Image (cartoon, rainbow, N blue to C red):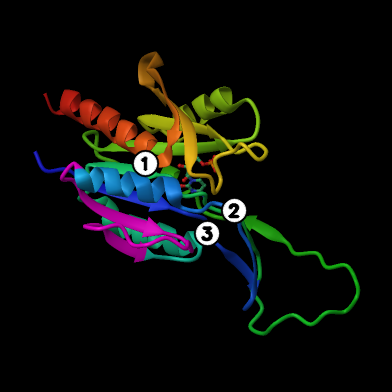
Amino acid sequence: MSIRCLITAGPTREYFDPVRFISNPSSGKMGFAIAEAASALGWTVDLVAGPVSLPEPVGVMLYPVVTAEEMLRQTDALFGPCDVLIMTAAVSDWRPKVCLPEKLKKTGKNLSVELEPVPDILATLAQRRRPDQLLVGFAAETESVEENARTKLSQKKIDFIAANSVAGPAGAFGRDENQLILLGREGYRQVIGPASKKVVAQKLVAELSAALATRSC
Ligand code: C5P
């Protein structure tokens, strides 16, 4: 069976003037490693990536985006035919309410920037999912990693969530190694790693492949 996989990776940037933005330190390494592992299994891979400094994975269709809104639009356009959606992107949860057309001048005074929530891409897509599609989220947490991830699994109405810690210098952001706790419905729980993101990606894709095989029986 040929599998079509849609992956998001990296951070988003949310600008309040043409040269300043809020974002996070996501490197995109986990998502790119998953894209490579999925492609190596023969899956067709669409990769929607925020601003990252990584080489384009071989055999993968890359769609660069910048903001959460752009990521939503691109992911939405590719979602229909996909069998598996893996959202590793560290989407900025807020964006400045206003983006000024010109660079804001220094005044020496405090500056308040009002933020508004960005759309939740995964939850939005989950509302119009087909039952045969597999939806996988990532939860980057600084505390109560597993508990918070389990809450997101049910709130976002998805099939799996991969929880990882982003607390302190040993956290997942930017590093070459990672450990995931993959949580699924009906108490499914699998610890993957610690290992290189490449190995973690291969094991994750193998787990998802097994889940897809069960589903199509
Ligand atoms: O930020 P949060 O912990 O809710 O992220 C959990 C999952 O939801 C991740 O897979 C992330 O890519 C996705 N997400 C999203 N849109 C957002 C925020 C998060 O799709 N605005």
Q: Position of residue 214 (x, y in %)?
A: 18, 23
The residues bearing labels 3 and 2 have C-alpha atoms spaced at a distance of 10 Å
Q: Farthest residue to the bottom: give it.
A: 102
Numbered mark located on residue 198 in the image: 1
Residue drawn at point x = 64 percent, y = 34 percent: 142
Where is mark 2, residue-wise? 25
Kind of residue at disc 1: Lys
Kind of residue at disc 3: Thr
Can see residue 124?
A: no
Based on the displayed image, in which of its 4 quarters is residue 42 positioned? top left
Q: Is label 1 within 8 A of ligand 1 (CB to nearest ligand atom)?
A: no
The residues bearing labels 1 and 3 have C-alpha atoms spaced at a distance of 23 Å
In this rendering, the label closer to the viewer, 1 or 3: 1
Can see residue 119?
A: yes
| Lower sequence index among marks 1 and 3 | 3
Kind of residue at disc 2: Pro
Give the quarter of the figure containing the N terminus.
top left
| Lower sequence index among marks 3 and 2 | 3
Q: Position of residue 34 (x, y in %)?
A: 34, 44
In this rendering, the label closer to the viewer, 1 or 2: 1
* Front residue of this view, candidates 161 and 118: 161
Q: Is residue 13 above or below residue 183?
A: below
95 left or right of 133? right
131 left or right of 1? right
